[in-house]
Image (tube, grey):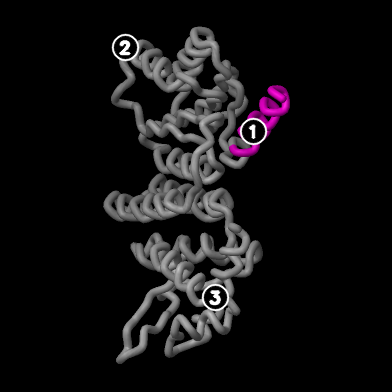
Amino acid sequence: MKHKIQKIKRNLIELLSNSKIGLSGTEISNKLNINRVTMTKYLNIFVSEGLIRQTTIGNANLWFVEKGITQFDLPDDYFKIKNKYLDYMLEFSSQHSTNLIRSLLHSDSHPTKIILEIIIPAIYHLQKLCSEKKIGRLDAKLSYRIISNSINLINSMVNDADFDKNILIISNEQNTLQAEAAAASFTSNNWNVLFLGDVSETIDVLFDLDLQKFFGKILANKGLILVLIFVESKEKLKFFSETMQIMKAKFDYDIFVILFYNDIKINVNADLITNDLNIVFQWADTKINSLSKWAE
């Protein structure tokens, strides 16, 4: 069913993109060889997704593809799209950035692929510009907001969660966007995502107790749970490593800890230490598949 809808989207975009004066619902259903009532249902869905729009001209209701929406030739176009997204981001062109991500979503591009090929490179590029002081703080703030809006758009296109696959995501202030991007990817793959975001201000002498109470609530009737923690310093890395070992010992559940940290060779106790989100996604899929086979 999903493949059928994607095919209709592609054909509809191509059809409307080649029409400067728009097409009526009847013309669309005839050209795509789809029942008129069924086509009307699809048109209404695609309007809500921002793919097309309807305009009344005289007595006629005509359909147009939304401005900025296009079909891409994937995967060949990813490099070109990445550079275009960077340009839009640094020009503060939120609408163009949104349309670019929306077009990708309507071009059968998986959300995780968009995150790895477009969103993460944009985050790292922006961080590099900030560290080299090639961009002002206010410029950076607006650019970060554009990326966050893109991640939220990806999040809006997801399916229902599988409550046998749970992931808790914790970040620091510096890596909040990476954490948001990771959350969007896991959500798009039907994980039940518990996103805490930046917890820097909550870390104190009572943090262990707060975390125990929190785990006691979220672990009730849960299956596998991964804990993905974005860490910016060795002190925090050691702190979270030791804290999570306490949680794993206290609760009789399948808890696996992933620490996202630049120095992957550092010696701390965790199930995975990496600085590559692609490795995080692959490792999580492998873990859930191995546990599922074991349960059978």
Q: Residue at x 50, y 66 (%)?
A: 103
Residue 136: give x, y in percent of width and height.
Answer: 30, 53
The amino acid type, in three-letter code, at marker 2 is Leu
Disc 1/disc 2 C-alpha distance (Å)? 32 Å
Q: Which residues are magenta?
A: 281-296
Q: Residue at x 57, y 83 (%)?
A: 31
Quadrant containing the N terminus is bottom right
The numbered disc on residue 138 is none
Above or below for 49 versus 162: below
Q: Earlier in the sequence, mark 1 or mark 2?
A: 2
Q: Residue furthest top?
A: 250
The amino acid type, in three-letter code, at marker 1 is Trp
> Is residue 268 in sight in this rendering?
no
- Secondary structure of the residue carrying tag 2 is loop
Disc 3/disc 2 C-alpha distance (Å)? 62 Å
The residue tagged 1 is 283
The residue tagged 2 is 206
Left or right: 48 with respect to 182? left
- Report crowding for label 3: few under 14, some 14 to 19, many 20 or more residues within 10 A (C-alpha): few
- Secondary structure of the residue carrying tag 1 is helix
Left or right: 206 with respect to 123? left
Front-lying residue, 93 or 151 = 151
The residue tagged 3 is 35
The amino acid type, in three-letter code, at marker 3 is Asn
**Picture quarter containing residue 269?**
top right
Which secondary structure class fits the magenta region best? helix
Q: Residue at x 64, y 30 (%)?
A: 288
Q: Is residue 82 magenta?
A: no
The label nearer to you, 3 versus 2, is 3
Q: Earlier in the sequence, mark 1 or mark 3?
A: 3
